Image: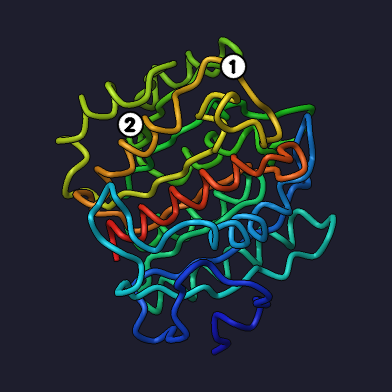
Amino acid sequence: MLSIFEHLHNQDRFLEAKDDYKNSKIVIIGVPMDFTVSFRPGTRFGPKKIREVSYGLESYSVYADDSLEEKKFFDAGDVDIPFGNVAKSLELIEEVTEHCLNDNKIPLFLGGEHLVSYPIVKKVAEKYPELTVVHFDAHADLRDSFFGEKLSHATVLRRISEHVKDKHIYHFGIRSGVKEEFVYANEHTHMFPIEVKAPFLSVFQDLKDKPIYITLDIDVIDPAFAPGTGTPEPGGCSSQEILEVVSYFKELNIVGFDLVEVSPANDLSERTSLLAAKIVREFIIGLG
């Protein structure tokens, strides 16, 4: 049987990542893919930039009063994405995810466009049949097709909904979409438009003890704080609010996480990548 490293290459690593895969609880995996983006490309460079700017952060978190230094996590590098081949790319992401889960690790994926979440959740749902997906995003991503394509960053949550049970998806911060997406959400998912923290806390107790996969599109945050994304949408939450929400993750049974849609070329200030790196730091400290 092939190892997880068969389809990975490692050029950079996240701040304080350890060299010990075997004894690590969390494994970071980059997915540099942006083949189906509909507005501004560039998220394929997100994983590299998030790692790079992580060295501008402290290992210690004021929020958690804890540090990355003692946390057992490993940076496995990036999936070797065959440029332009969507189907093969998704297949490789599935394989890497399966290896990670078979090794009893918590995968932490860095995108990349949001479509990369689909093959990941497919595999996570196979291992955890009662999986609940918690989705932070500006966009519903519930279209059945987009410009005739079933596989798109605009359809990813619709495809995911086909692999988890009805009403096992919770959306927070959604402030963009077509009416049909919201009709579908009201019938099959839990949709909380516009707001993030308040609705998340209102269902927080319901999420406890369930196997949780979290997918966080950086555009859930207002472009004033995170302009470096492919499809910015005004009216989002602040960076402080999303960090407050992340502080609650440690109380959940999280079995997988991704942070997607960071597009460094659209933010020369690097504040979007820095925020992403800080979210990752807080996530690892909370669960590590």
Report the front residue among 43 and 279. Answer: 279
Residue at 50% across, 42% down: 160
3D distance between C-alphas at marks 2 and 1: 28 Å
Report the front residue among 115 and 127. Answer: 115
Colouring: rainbow
What is the quadrant of the C terminus in the image? bottom left
Labels 2 and 1 touching (C-beta < 8 A): no
Classify mark 2: helix, strand or loop.
loop
Q: Is residue 3 left or right of residue 126?
A: right
Q: Is residue 184 above or below residue 219?
A: above
Residue at 69% across, 37% down: 150
Question: Which residue sits furthest bottom?
Answer: 1
Q: Quadrant of residue 266?
A: top right
Image coordinates for residue 87, horizontal then vertical, percent = 74, 56
Number of the front mark, 2 or 1: 1
Image coordinates for residue 158, horizontal then vertical, percent = 54, 34
Q: Earlier in the sequence, mark 2 or mark 1?
A: 2
Image coordinates for residue 230, horizontal then vertical, percent = 71, 34
Q: Which residue is mark 1?
A: 234
Residue at 74% across, 40% down: 268
Q: Is residue 29 above or below residue 168?
A: below
The amino acid type, in three-letter code, at marker 2 is Lys
Report the front residue among 108 and 180. Answer: 108
Q: Which mark is residue 268?
A: none
Q: Is residue 161 left or right of residue 141?
A: left
Q: Label 1 crowding class (10 Å Cα cut-off): few <14, some 14-19, many 20+?
A: some
Classify mark 1: helix, strand or loop.
loop
Residue at 45% across, 33% down: 239
Q: Which residue is mark 2?
A: 167
Q: Label 2 crowding class (10 Å Cα cut-off): few <14, some 14-19, many 20+?
A: some
Q: Quadrant of residue 208?
A: top left
The amino acid type, in three-letter code, at marker 1 is Pro
